[in-house]
Image (cartoon, rainbow, N blue to C red):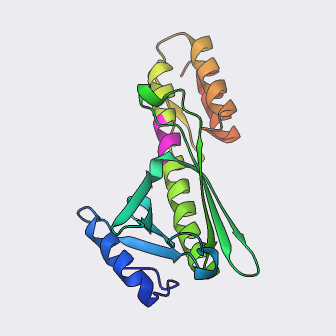
Amino acid sequence: MADAATTTTPAAVPGLASLQAILVRDEVIEATAIQRRLFALTHRRVVVAATTNRLIALKRGLFGGYEYSDLRWQDLKEAHVHVGIFAATLRLVVENTSDLASAQTPNRVLEFTGLDAAEAQAVYRVCQAQDQAWREKRRVREMEELRARSGGVQIMGGAAAGLAAPTGDPLQRLEQARQMLASKLISDAEYEAIKAKILSGA
């Protein structure tokens, strides 16, 4: 189902139908943005779709058919939207993947110009929500990895923090807690609670 802000033009209907055909099981389109005709005088118009799994860009080929490119939400690093007088520009920075073969590849920038302003903002909202969700997932994963390496430091939810059994080097556990604080994986209050428990030998 497309976002309520999307207005479908007759010329875009075949493209949207083609887009529906490549969705995987349980994948849903949350918002779409179509390039305005004024900005597509020298090429076929582009359709950008934000789904529950990824962002897809669709462009009709010169000799028929469609060209697709997409990015996974977990690879999205930044999303920006600029709304001008006549149209909007959506700019996305795509982070390096964790694949060894692409470890040295610089971040990619995807830019879609001439989009309908309301539609571009709808796609941008989905991008922002997905970016925040994946940042939180990465934060939790990093925190768990640090906890596993720290010899038993465990972070409780909310403002409370605790420690596992007091085994291991207290200085090493304290240093791990400092690293978590510096990386903004825990709050000041959580760090102080952890430090107090380490120093008390609890």
Q: Where 35 sits versus 57, above or below?
A: below
Q: Quadrant of the N terminus?
A: bottom left
Q: Where 64 sits versus 118, above or below?
A: above
Residue 15, image x and y in percent? 38, 75
Residue 44 falls left or right of residue 36: left
Task: Kindly identify the residue that appears in the image at 64 percent across and 25 percent down.
Answer: 179
Q: Which residues are magenta?
A: 136-141
Quarter occupied by residue 196: top right
Residue 121, image x and y in percent? 61, 74
**Residue 175 in sight:** yes
Q: Residue furthest left?
A: 25
**Number of numbered callouts drawn:** 0
Foreground residue among 128 and 202: 128
Q: Residue furthest front?
A: 63
Quarter occupied by residue 127: bottom right
Quarter occupied by residue 62: bottom left
Q: Residue furthest top?
A: 169
Q: Where 1 sits versus 71, above or below?
A: below
Task: Kindly identify the residue that appears in the image at 50 percent across and 83 percent down.
Answer: 6
Residue 116, image x and y in percent? 60, 80
Q: Residue furthest right?
A: 85
Residue 157 falls left or right of residue 81: left
Task: Kindly identify the residue that appears in the image at 52 percent across and 37 percent down.
Answer: 96
Foreground residue among 71 and 129: 71
Foreground residue among 200 and 38: 38
**Residue 164 in sight:** no
Residue 180 falls left or right of residue 167: right
Is 139 contained in the magenta span? yes
Task: Kindly identify the residue that appears in the image at 63 percent across and 80 percent down.
Answer: 38
By secondary structure, the bulk of the magenta-drawn segment is best described as helix
Residue 95, image x and y in percent? 55, 42
